[in-house]
Image (cartoon, rainbow, N blue to C red):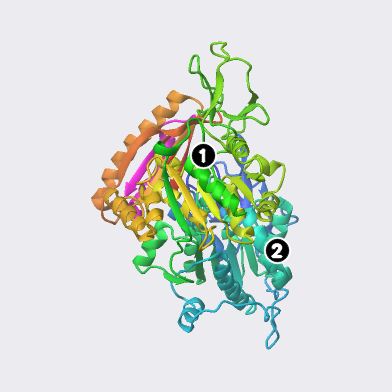
Amino acid sequence: MSGKICVNVLVDVPGIGNRPYSYYLPPGTRPVKGLMVSVPFGPRMANGFILGEGLEPEGVAVKDISTLYDRRYLPPADLVEFGEEVARYYAVPVASVWGCLWPPGVPRAKGEGPLEETVAPTRKSAPGVRPANGESPCEDLKRPELGEMNREQVTCEGTKPLIVRGTESFRFDVFLEQIQNEVFRGRGVLFLLPEVRAVRRVKDKIRPLFGETLAEVHSGMTDKRRREEWLRLLRGEKRLVLGTRLGVFAPVKDLSLIIVDLEEDDSYKAEDHPRYDARTVSVMRGRFQGARVIIGVSRLPVNSRFALNSGTYDLLKDEGPRYPGEVQVIEARKYRRKGKILSWKMADALKDCFDRKGRAFIFLNQRGYGRALFCGDCGYVPVCPRCSVALSFHSGSRSMVCHVCGHSTPVPETCPECGGYSLKPRGFGTERLEEEFSRLFPEVPVFRVDADTARLEEPETTVGRFLSTRPACLIGTEMAIGVATALQSGPLELVAVPFAGSRLGLPGFNVEEDAYLTLSRLWDLLDEKTGVFVLQAFDPLRRSIRWIAEKDEDLFYEEEMEDRKALGYPPFGVLARIEVVGKGEGKVREKASGLAEKLRAEALSLEQDEVSGEGRVTVLGPAPCLKERVRGAYRWHILLKGPDRAKVTALASKAEEIFWEIGSGTRITVDVDPVRLV
């Protein structure tokens, strides 16, 4: 025995799961669960987290911990424990989730001493909090007019998660009243929004009310500022967190309320490891820490509708479903103009709008001029050298750009394959739509919002200029929808969607729902009485379009639920997606096939009641991903599907262990509750 303290460390390295490794603590320190450290791991240094004191293994050369990170950032014990619960739910190593509990770029610890003594034990009152019998700085603020029964439903503690459905102003009024109540009582509040722009807009609204008690947590901040905010939260100096999905793990003291607005936005789902969903984690955290959870929606996602029907959630709404204005559905096969985006019927609707000095928004979720260039002589299509996708043509810069990895190259004078001069754009993008529109309506000011124009001017500025002009037209991708919703100074007279069914050909169990939610957000931009919603589609009988024509959202939900139940998709089943990635196409295919075979054997063993629950887990695949090659790496995936979460999660948690037993050279990602299957 060496006399040193030996601790178990969970090392944050892919492939080792939750297997602890033994290390010696530096002299004069004691182990604290969840403390971040740096340790020698093979030929490299790796970050890890102390699990607790352990026995010194016999016959093993135990190494010293190289670095202790600044102990001021140590998460509270209950948050560390909660991280373990999240890791179990998403079938990922605990270390990967514990890493989310620390801000980025934490410095090394200075000096020695007992770890417990470095965390401030006292709680300070948050600046701006109303003292006992004091006056609120928000007394003059307009509060929502809720009925007595509804107000009790919102304010009572320990209830089920509450869905607040309605306009942005209605939801914000409800949220603001609840935030005031909690902050003025000295409690903590977590307010999540799907994107950084939304966080900044809400911050500008509420900072005058809450002052220095307001903290931000999102990727638009510098690492230094995020660390500063993290420390103030740990000390109790700030009580209200406004953030994106990163904020779901913020160390808010005395947390009593969690708000998740625009739950229908899939930006809450992390795209990198660990692939948690902040919407789910918020509900889990509320249950774990005894905080109320309020969820804001403009239209109900399928899972939320199911939760309401089953009594899992409660509902507060300002009114019934909104079906504003007139709806026109155009069958593209009959009325389209050859080689054009706008059919003559859609062009007529736009003309009527502009004759009335109205404002129109044309939605096209494809930036650039066209999806790709095409050689009319030999059929050649330029493809990204690093990804298995065609390069999109951008006429303004005369370049071809990969919208996956960002690779860009000038447009060649001749076809690289045959030397011909017949390279022409195929498909339609916002640049091409702007050009076509200007030819049809040269007198009408046109504004464009997409990822390309956002580099030149803030989308809020562009949309603001559009909203202050009559007549005017806005052409935009999904980026424009959120901005137009937030900045709307008045409803629009027309919204046009030239390719209303463009997403419905993609693989996935929820493509109809994606189209439904997008079209719903567009519909809500219209004037209640005079607005016109024009949808152009090749298949107007798809339910994501038909419900709009019939102004009956129940039609969509009933058909969607019926199909999902028959096929065992969420919310009637559980999915886990396992992605295998590597540089060699053959090796990726081989590893994915070997993993799928072993997972099928494991699935059979789960049926022998090793894990409680009913129903078997089906292993589908492997198959190449829709974008088989991204940034030079090949991608194959496997899908686990079953009615019982415990069994699906148990099998998913074994995937990484099995994967590393059958060789190296590739990597694996486990995604429980995926929102995309591509």
The answer to whether any part of residue 518 appears in the image is no
Q: Give whichever of discs 2 and 1 has the lower sequence position.
A: 2
Spot occupied by residue 23 in the image (x, y as percentages of width and height): 58, 48
Looking at the image, residue 166 lies above or below residue 645: below
Where is mark 1, residue-wise?
A: 342
The stretch of residues the image draws in magenta is: 638-666
Looking at the image, residue 112 lies above or below residue 186: above
Q: Callout 1: helix, strand or loop?
A: loop
- Residue 655 within the magenta-colored segment of the rendering: yes
> Is residue 564 shown left or right of residue 23?
left
Where is mark 2, residue-wise?
A: 204
Which of discs 2 and 1 lies nearer the camera? The answer is: 1
Query: Label for residue 652?
Result: none
- Residue 136 within the magenta-colored segment of the rendering: no
Which quadrant of the rendered structure holds the C terminus? top left
Looking at the image, residue 250 lies above or below residue 592: below
Spot occupied by residue 313 in the image (x, y as percentages of width and height): 41, 68
The answer to whether any part of residue 461 appears in the image is yes
> Is residue 130 shown left or right of residue 280?
right
Q: Nearer the viewer, residue 43 or 62?
A: 43
Amino acid tagged 1: Leu
Q: Residue at x 65, y 63 (%)?
A: 202
Q: Callout 2: helix, strand or loop?
A: helix
